[in-house]
Image (spheres, rainbow, N blue to C red):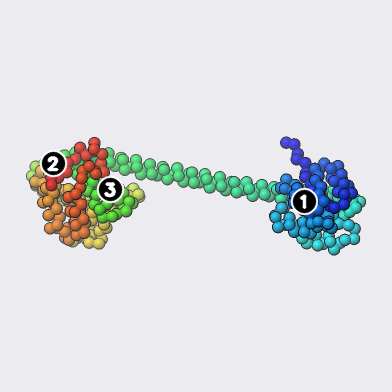
Amino acid sequence: MEKKKTKIIIADDDPMVRNTVSKILEMFGHEVTTVVDGSGVFERVDDSFDVIILDINMPGMDGFATINELNRRNFDIPVLFLTGAGSMDYAVKAINLGAYDFLTKPIEDLDIFNVKIRRAIEKRMYVLKERQYKESLEDDVREKTMMLEKQNKLLFRYSENLEKATVQMMSSMQNAMEEKDYYTAGHTMRVTEYAVLLGKAMDIDEENQLVLRRAAQFHDIGKLVIDLSCIQKPGKLTEDEWKLIRKHPSVGANIVKPLKFMEREQFIIRHHHERMDGKGYPAGIQGEQLDQLTKILIVVDSYDAMTSKRNYRKNLNMDEALQELHVCSGTQFDKETVEVFSKTIVDFNPAESIFSKEYQDNYTLPEK
Ligand SMILES: [Fe+2]
C-alpha cells in the first residue's frame, strides 16, 4: 500500500515564513497547505490533516484564539506554535492551552525542527490508531451482541420446536390410547373443546388458556398405562377396578412430570378428579387449594362423562347434565365455574369449534 503523505497546515501572516516553512516541510516529503490566519485554518482544515502549525500574532484570528476554537471543536490534531526567539511567555501559554510543542523562528536547526514535526506526526498516528481501535472494539461488541441475539433466537426456536414435538408425540400416544377404548374416544377432544370455551368465557388470559388446553388434551393420559379392558366390559365396575381407574390422574401427572414446561399442566392433570369438598381423589384437596384452571377441567370433564354413553349406564342429555352440575355445585364443583359453564354451553355453536371439520367428525356432541 502506498504510504499516505502527511498533511500539514501552516497559518502565518508573514509570507516569507509561510514560504520557508512549507519549503522545508515539502523537502521532508509532507503535503503542505498555507493560510494567513486562524480563520483560514477553519476554512481548510479537516480530519485528513495530521499537524497544524500556528503563528501567534496574526492580524485576523490569532494563534491563541485558533487553538481555543480547535479544542472546542475536538479536532485532535497536534498543534505546533511558531514563536520568535525570546517569547518564552507565549510558548508557555501555548503549551498550557494544549499546544503539543513549539517551533522557534527563524528556523536555525533543521534537525530539531524535523524531530519536533515527526513527534507531532507520531502523536497524530497514535490518536488515529486509538480511534480505530475504539471503533473496531465497538464494531466487535456490536457484532458479538448480534451473534448472541441470533443464537438466542435459534435456541428459543429449538426449545419451542422441542416443546411442539413432545406435545405432538404425546398426542399420538393419546390417540392410540383412545383407539383402545371406544367409549372414551372423542372424550379428550370434547373436554378440550369445552375447557377452551369455558376458559374464554371466564376471561382467562392467553398464556393460561394454553396451559388449560394442554392440560385438557392430556388429562387422561394416565389411562395409557392402565389396563382398560374393564371399562369395556358390560355392567358395573368392581371396587378393585375402580381403584385401578382412580390411579390414572397420578399416573398421568407422573408421565408429564419430567417435562418442565408442563409443570402447571401436571398439577391440573393430577387433580382433575378432586372435589370442592375434598372428597375427590387422589389427594383429597379442596376449595381454594384447587386453582381456577383445575376447577374448569373438573367441571367440563364431569359434564362430558355424564353426557357420554357408557356400558354401565345411560348417558344424560345437556339439560339433565347441567341440572346435575347445579345439584353438585359447591360440593363437587366450583359454583362460579358451573354458573358460567351452564350459560356458555347452551349457546355453543359447533361451527365455532377449535378443531377443524375433519377432527369434529371424530366426536359427537350431546343432545340438547
Ligand atoms: Fe379422568
Decide if ligand 1 comes within 8 Å of the CB at mark 3. no
For residue 366, side relative to residue 164 (left or right): left
* Residue annotated with mark 1: 41
Q: Residue at x 30, y 40 (%)?
A: 169
N-terminal of the pair, mark 2 or mark 3, is 3
- As shown in the figure, which amino acid type bears the numbered disc 1? Val
> Toward which corner of the image does residue 174 lie, by quadrant?
top left
Three-letter amino acid code at the position of disc 3: Arg
Judge the density around disc 1: few (<14), some (14-19), many (≥20) Cα neighbours within 10 Å. Answer: many
Among all residues in the image, which is located at the extreme bottom?
89
Q: Earlier in the sequence, mark 1 or mark 3?
A: 1
Camera-side residue: 316 or 368? 368
Compare residues 27 and 54 and report the one nearer the observer.
54
Q: Classify mark 2: helix, strand or loop.
A: helix
Q: How much space separates mark 2 and mark 3, taking CA atoms?
A: 27 Å
Query: Image check: 278 left or right of 145?
Result: left
Residue 44: horizontal and vertical position, in percent?
75, 48
- The residue that mark 3 highlights is 213
Residue topped by disc 2: 232
The residue nearer to you, when weighing 32 against 211, is 32
Is the CB of mark 1 within 8 Å of ligand 1?
A: no
